[in-house]
Image (cartoon, rainbow, N blue to C red):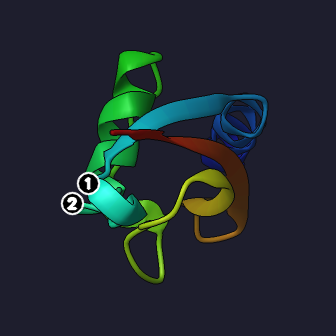
Amino acid sequence: AEELSAAQEVAAKISGLTVDLTLEVGQGGKAFGAITNQNIHDALTAQGVEGDRRAIELEKPIKSEGEHEVVIKVHPQVEATLKVVVKENA
């Protein structure tokens, strides 16, 4: 029960966060790479949220700018939704 309660606290913290990441873009708006779960994990760690990067459920790397919602499985019974804002850097 304590583990579940702690997971719910972490999920609440994650759900209240927004992570801003930059995507390198060349001429014509073509992305040079992508935002991966490792990038998201690093950004969360920088904001003081520790966790396993494999818990970040990213179907495929993000290759477009804008707002994206990413599900993070904090505990088998607890999920959090993180808002990831991707900006292009030409």
Which badge, 2 or 1, comes first in the chain's sequence? Answer: 1
List the single residue furthest toward the front: 28
Viewer-side label of 2, 1: 1
Can residue 36 be seen in the rendering of this structure? no
Tell me the quarter of the picture where residue 51 sits.
Answer: top left
Q: Residue at x 40, y 45 (%)?
A: 40
Q: In the image, 89: left or right of 33?
A: right
Q: Residue at x 36, y 18 (%)?
A: 46
Residue 44 vertical placement versus 83 (above, below): above
At label 1, the amino acid type is Gly
- Left or right, residue 27 beside residue 67: left
| Secondary structure at numbered mark 2 | loop
Q: At x 56% / y 32%, what residue is drawn?
A: 19
Residue 29 lies, with reference to residue 13, above or below; the image says below
Residue holding disc 2: 32
Picture coordinates of residue 6 (x, y %)? 65, 35
Badge 1 is on which residue? Answer: 26
- Cα separation, mark 2 vs mark 1, equals 7 Å
Q: Amino acid at mark 2?
A: Phe
Q: Which type of secondary structure does the marked residue at label 1 adopt?
A: loop
Quadrant into which the C terminus falls: top left
| Quadrant in the picture for residue 14 | top right
Q: Residue 56, which numbered label?
A: none
| Displayed quadrant of residue 65 | bottom right
Q: Are marks 2 and 1 in contact (CB under 8 Å)?
A: yes
Q: How many marks?
A: 2
